[in-house]
Image (cartoon, rainbow, N blue to C red):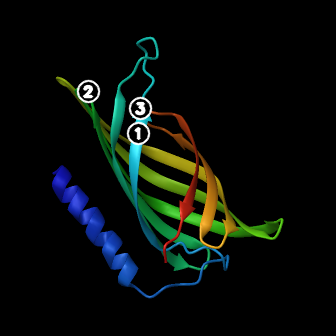
């Protein structure tokens, strides 16, 4: 089932790249993309905050359907010491250009997604479906180099809030 899910996610992402682009609200940012990430997670647990260390891969995709709206999705597959975690999200995003900050383009991105989490640890196996809400800012520092920050709130028991700060380089 997991392999079928990965293949399906990759096929949808590849098809979105072939579709005709729709101009986003901000001229600097393209919300039609495929992304692959290496993920290294330190999981806090109720056991003296000594949770497992997980690593794996995340595939993300976005497809612009209107000037300020995109369909989004991601698949995260991680594993660690006798622990596996898989997270699938599907939803929509709203993006809006904000006034430039020191002549650098800035966008606000708001997201709502359905999130399915599957967790396996030894004989313990559980899954849960919930809602993920997120808000973030994206700024172009120089041509094709972006900085971003996201705050996410999830209704799943496996995580309640996450903060992500990072950078991206667009090759195309």
Give the residue displayed 60% in from the left and 71% down from the top. 144
Q: Position of residue 32 (x, y in %)?
A: 48, 74
* Residue 7 on image: x %, y %: 21, 63
Q: Disc number at residue 158? A: 3
Does 29 sit left or right of 127 as displayed? Answer: right
> Residue 84, image x and y in percent?
26, 35
Which mark is in front, 3 or 1? 1
Q: Residue at x 32, y 78 (%)?
A: 15
Closer to us: 49 or 103: 103
Which residue occupies 67% across, 76% down?
Answer: 26
**Quadrant in the picture for residue 125:** top left
Give me the disc on residue 81. Answer: 2
Q: Residue at x 63, y 67 (%)?
A: 95
Task: Return the residue nearer the eye: 111 or 57.
Answer: 57
Q: Tell which residue pokes out farthest to the top in this image.
A: 48
Which residue in the protein does label 1 denote?
40
């Amino acid at each position: 089932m997991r392999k079928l899910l990965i293949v399906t996610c990759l096929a949808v992402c590849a098809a979105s790249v072939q579709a005709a682009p729709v101009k986003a609200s901000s001229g600097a940012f393209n919300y039609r993309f495929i992304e692959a990430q290496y993920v290294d997670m330190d999981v806090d647990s109720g056991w003296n905050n000594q949770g497992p260390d997980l690593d794996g891969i995340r595939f993300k995709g976005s497809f612009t359907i209107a000037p300020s709206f995109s369909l989004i999705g991601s698949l995260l597959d991680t594993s660690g010491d006798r622990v596996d975690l898989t997270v699938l999200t599907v939803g929509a995003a709203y993006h809006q250009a904000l006034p430039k900050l020191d002549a650098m383009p800035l966008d606000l991105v708001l997201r709502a997604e359905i999130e399915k989490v599957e967790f396996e640890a030894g004989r313990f196996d559980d899954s849960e479906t919930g809602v993920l809400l997120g808000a973030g800012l994206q700024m172009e520092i120089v041509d094709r180099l972006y900085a971003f920050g996201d705050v996410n709130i999830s209704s799943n028991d496996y995580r309640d809030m996450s903060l992500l700060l990072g950078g991206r380089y667009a090759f195309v």
